[in-house]
Amino acid sequence: MKISVLTMFEDDESVFACLKPGLLGYLLKEAEQTAIEWAAAADLGLGSKTIWNLVSNVFAKLGAADRAQTIIKARAAGMGQR
């Protein structure tokens, strides 16, 4: 399985901690949204249409209309907290 991580940390310790367990790579959250999606698609060997379909499926499963609602629901569920 190929996995990349999306992170806001770019210090060496955090990057190496992500790569150590065998992750394929990492992307910084501050990158432009489309750049993140295309980099993820390239890392995973997926086409852009597949990525858009996967994002739409996540929205549908969460009952969210957009990324902002998805983030709110994820944080309410305890995700993204240190």
Image (cartoon, grey):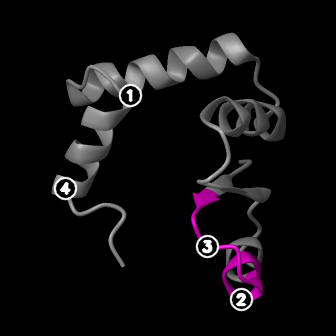
- Residue type, numbered disc 2: Glu
Q: Secondary structure under badge 2?
A: helix
| Left or right: 61, with 58 as reference point | left
Q: CA distance from mark 1 to mark 2?
A: 31 Å
Question: Which label lies toward us, 1 or 2?
Answer: 2
Q: Position of residue 7 (x, y in %)?
A: 59, 62
Which residue is labeled 4 in the image? 77
> Could you tell which of marks 3 and 4 lies nearer the N-terminus?
3
Crowding at mark 1 (Cα within 10 Å: few <14, some 14-19, many 20+): some
Q: Is residue 58 left or right of residue 70?
A: right
**CB of mark 1 within 8 Å of CB of mark 2?**
no
- Position above or below: 76 against 37: below
Mark 3 or 2, which is nearer the eye?
3
**Dot label at residue 58:** 1
Per the rendered image, the range of residues in magenta is 6-16
Element assignment for label 3: loop
Q: Are marks 2 and 4 in contact (CB under 8 Å)?
A: no
Q: CA distance from mark 3 to mark 2?
A: 9 Å
In which quarter of the view is residue 50 placed?
A: top right
- Residue 35 drawn above or below residue 53: below
In the rendered structure, does residue 8 fall within the stretch colored magenta?
yes
Is label 4 in a helix, a strand or a loop? Answer: loop
At x 71%, y 89%, the residue is 13
Q: Residue at x 78, y 58 (%)?
A: 25
Three-letter code, disc 1? Val
> What residue sits 48% from the left and 24% below the top?
55
- The disc, 1 or 3, on the residue closer to the chain's N-terminal end is 3
